[in-house]
Amino acid sequence: MLPHHWLAVGVIVAVLLVGIPLAHALVGDLGAILLLTGVGGFALGRATAKHDIPGSAALRAKSQARRRQGGE
């Protein structure tokens, strides 16, 4: 099985080869730029987000315990 980062590389290549021409055909030049900038920004934000963001009760409790101890 391939390492996890190769999946990300494959997705980026697929977007470059398929997504850009498809977006250009559907919404034109400016629309494709705006659409792909928004989608790319969202994907980049999700990829670089902290993974311990409180979202469930267990993670929230762990985060609050860290704050009480003075850590991040």
Image: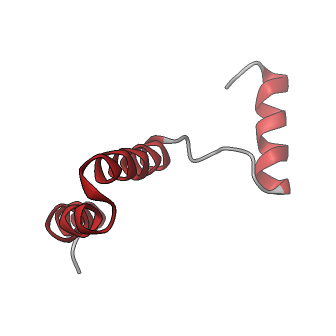
Q: Residue furthest top?
A: 70
Q: Residue at x 70, y 23 (%)?
A: 71
> Dividing the image into 4 quarters, which one contains the C terminus?
top right
Q: How is the image coloured?
A: secondary structure
> Quarter of the image holding residue 20?
bottom left
- Compared to residue 20, the image places residue 14 above or below, namely below
53 vs 56, left or right, is left
> Quarter of the image holding residue 70?
top right
Q: Residue at x 74, y 46 (%)?
A: 54
> Quarter of the image holding residue 23?
bottom left
Q: Residue at x 84, y 35 (%)?
A: 64
Q: Residue at x 79, y 26 (%)?
A: 67
33 vs 65, left or right, is left
Q: Position of residue 49 (x, y in %)?
A: 52, 42
Q: Position of residue 33 (x, y in %)?
A: 29, 46
Given residues 40 and 6, the one toward you in this image is 40
Given residues 28 and 46, the one toward you in this image is 28
Q: Residue furthest bottom?
A: 1
Given residues 24 and 70, the one toward you in this image is 24
Q: Position of residue 9 (x, y in %)?
A: 20, 61
Given residues 64 and 13, the one toward you in this image is 13
Q: Position of residue 37 (x, y in %)?
A: 35, 44
> Dividing the image into 4 quarters, which one contains the N terminus?
bottom left
Number of numbered tags placed on the structure image: 0
- Compared to residue 54, the image places residue 67 above or below, namely above
- Compared to residue 4, the image places residue 72 above or below, namely above
6 vs 60, left or right, is left
